[in-house]
């Protein structure tokens, strides 16, 4: 029976995903909510959330290549093709794109450290929900979730069983318990400010600037629909 997807098909899907525009920021129109989001961003760092949800990582080489030299064994490798397909993640494809540094590197504002952590314990085992060992990784370890689209991607949790950002924060345990407890110790308006900040991190329409207001986003979506280009977050 022939393969359902050819090597070319898989390559096309890979390139499509790699070339997608990155998320950005949607700032509240309301001045009070915008001020709360700004305060929430500072509080997010102050209570230690950025220890793992790092606001930015540096990509030394902004050029994406397929096949990639980091492809694991058993996958297509650069030596398997005459010439890899490459493009610059900071210059090619629809915006918003990764920011380019003066020395030619790229800034990835993904709010992750791309490391595995244990964020569950006996007192709160909610995130200890994996049952199958994969690639010898302990079942209680998970990569730090990227938050750069968290305002668009409810529900939350590994199983999608948490409906709000606050619920997701309050189920952080294990290595993340200190940050959770600092969040719980905040005044209610400060907790709400952190959530307001996180809600600004959203998926944007292709071609949008990296930062827009709520009214600007509505206008961008209206124009796309008027041009027959539907878009949903």
Image (spheres, rainbow, N blue to C red):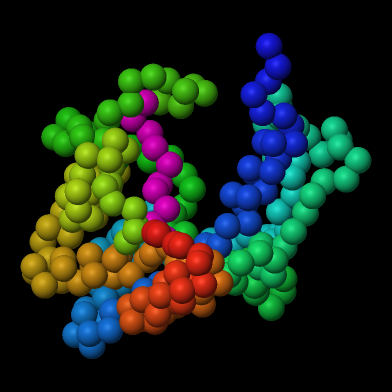
Q: Nearer the viewer, residue 199 or 177?
A: 199
Give how far across and how far down residue 52 sits, in percent: 39, 53
Q: Examine the rendering and report whether any part of residue 46 can be seen.
A: no
Image quarter where the C terminus lies is: bottom left
Segment colored magenta: 139-149
Give how far across and how far down residue 180 sits, in percent: 20, 53
Image quarter where the N terminus lies is: top right
Q: Examine the rendering and report whether any part of residue 144 can be seen.
A: yes
Q: Quadrant of residue 43?
A: bottom left
User: What residue sits 11% from the left and 72% below the top?
Assistant: 189
User: What residue sits 20% from the left and 72% below the top?
Assistant: 193
Inspect the magenta stretch and tell me whether residue 36 lies in it: no
In the image: residue 3, left or right of residue 42: right
* Number of marks in picture: 0
Q: Main secondary structure of the magenta part?
A: loop
Q: Which residue sits furthest left?
A: 188
Give how far across and how far down residue 54 sits, in percent: 43, 60
Give how far across and how far down residue 77 sits, in percent: 78, 34
User: What residue sits 40% from the left and 80% below the top?
Assistant: 219
Q: Which residue sits furthest right?
A: 82
As displayed, is residue 58 above or below residue 215? above
User: What residue sits 32% from the left and 61% below the top?
Assistant: 151
As displayed, is residue 27 above or below residue 13? below
Q: Nearer the viewer, residue 153 or 194?
A: 153
């Amino acid at each position: 029976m022939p393969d359902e997807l050819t090597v070319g098909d898989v390559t096309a899907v890979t390139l499509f995903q790699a070339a997608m525009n990155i998320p950005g920021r949607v700032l509240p129109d309301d001045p009070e909510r915008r001020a709360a989001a700004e305060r929430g961003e500072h509080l997010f760092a102050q209570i230690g959330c950025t220890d793992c949800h790092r606001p930015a990582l540096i990509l030394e080489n902004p050029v994406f290549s397929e096949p990639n030299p980091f492809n694991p064994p058993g996958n297509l490798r650069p030596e398997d093709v005459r010439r890899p397909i490459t493009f610059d993640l900071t210059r090619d494809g629809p915006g918003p794109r990764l920011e380019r540094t003066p020395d030619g590197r790229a800034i990835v504002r993904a709010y992750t450290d791309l490391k595995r952590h244990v964020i569950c314990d006996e007192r709160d085992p909610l995130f200890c929900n994996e049952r199958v060992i994969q690639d010898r990784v302990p079942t209680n370890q998970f990569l730090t979730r990227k938050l750069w689209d968290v305002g668009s991607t409810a529900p939350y949790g590994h199983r999608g069983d948490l409906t709000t950002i606050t619920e997701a924060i309050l189920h952080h345990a294990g290595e993340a318990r200190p940050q959770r407890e600092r969040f719980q110790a905040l005044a209610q308006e400060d907790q709400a400010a952190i959530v307001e900040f996180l809600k600004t991190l959203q998926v944007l329409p292709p071609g949008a600037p990296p930062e827009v207001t709520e009214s600007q986003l509505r206008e961008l979506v209206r124009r796309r629909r008027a041009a027959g280009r539907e878009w949903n977050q």
